[in-house]
Amino acid sequence: MKKVLFGWSGGKDSVMALYEIQKNHEYEVVSLLTTITEDYDRISMHGVRRVLVEQQAQSLGIPLHKVFISKSCSNEEYGAKMSAALNLFKQEGVETVAFGDIFLEEVRKYREDNLALLNMKGVFPLWGRNSAELVRSFIALGFKSVVSCISTKVLDKKFLGRQIDKDFIAELPPNIDPSGENGEFHSFVYDGPIFKQKIDYSRGESVLRDSFHFCDLIPTGLM
């Protein structure tokens, strides 16, 4: 089996891609790789607390490697820190990194171009899948997730903190990608068939930052 590092956000596309890659037994996932905005101690973009993603990794039984970036992170800072992390795994014989991207060509090209600089390559288990079909499969498989962040430019606040289920998908405006692939919303997965145990949380306050609305998910025990 080939060793693979997994680019991890903790959201439904990451989880679904992991599910797919584990099904075919071609790869051994040696670690999840995530970026943490150190000023907030949260997953970058998704706004989920670091401890919840650590609990995810523990439930999945996969190590988690964290890359800490500043809240005003430049492309140069991000590139340098990610390259340093990738080089650590390359020294251990890992030459492949998996991602949960579905159809954004520019994002895939960015990833592949940067990996090529390190003589590494990317794999994209969900690439080319229909977004609506993908999220329906996610729900049908029994995965459970909550919307942790929305773009206020395209979505109403009523979608924030919602469970991603059939009703949620049915209520999305027609211009919104059902998987949120264009950044319309982000999520946190707390249960499902590849998790050993459910991750418990409670819903905290909502925070508006720039054009994004975040729902604070509070780990059980921190109330």
Image (spheres, helix red, strand yellow):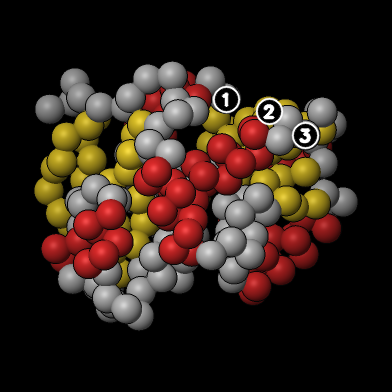
Q: At x 67% / y 53%, what residue is drawn?
A: 124
Give the quadrant of the N terminus: top right
| Total tally of numbered discs in the picture | 3
What kind of residue is marked 3? Answer: Glu
- Give the number of the disc on residue 63: 1
Task: Name the N-terminal-most of marks 1 and 2.
Answer: 2
178 shown above or below 198: below
- Cβ atoms at labels 1 and 3 below 8 Å apart: no
Q: Work out whether 43 lies above or below 151.
A: above
What is the CA distance from the residue labelled 1 to the residue labelled 3? 19 Å
Front residue of 110 and 167: 167
Residue behind mark 2: 30
Q: Which residue is mark 3?
A: 26
Q: Residue at x 61, y 41 (%)?
A: 20
User: Image check: 196 left or right of 123?
Assistant: left
Circle 2: element type? strand
Mark 1, secondary structure of its residue: loop
Cβ atoms at labels 1 and 2 below 8 Å apart: yes
Q: Disc 1 versus disc 2: distance between alpha carbons?
A: 7 Å
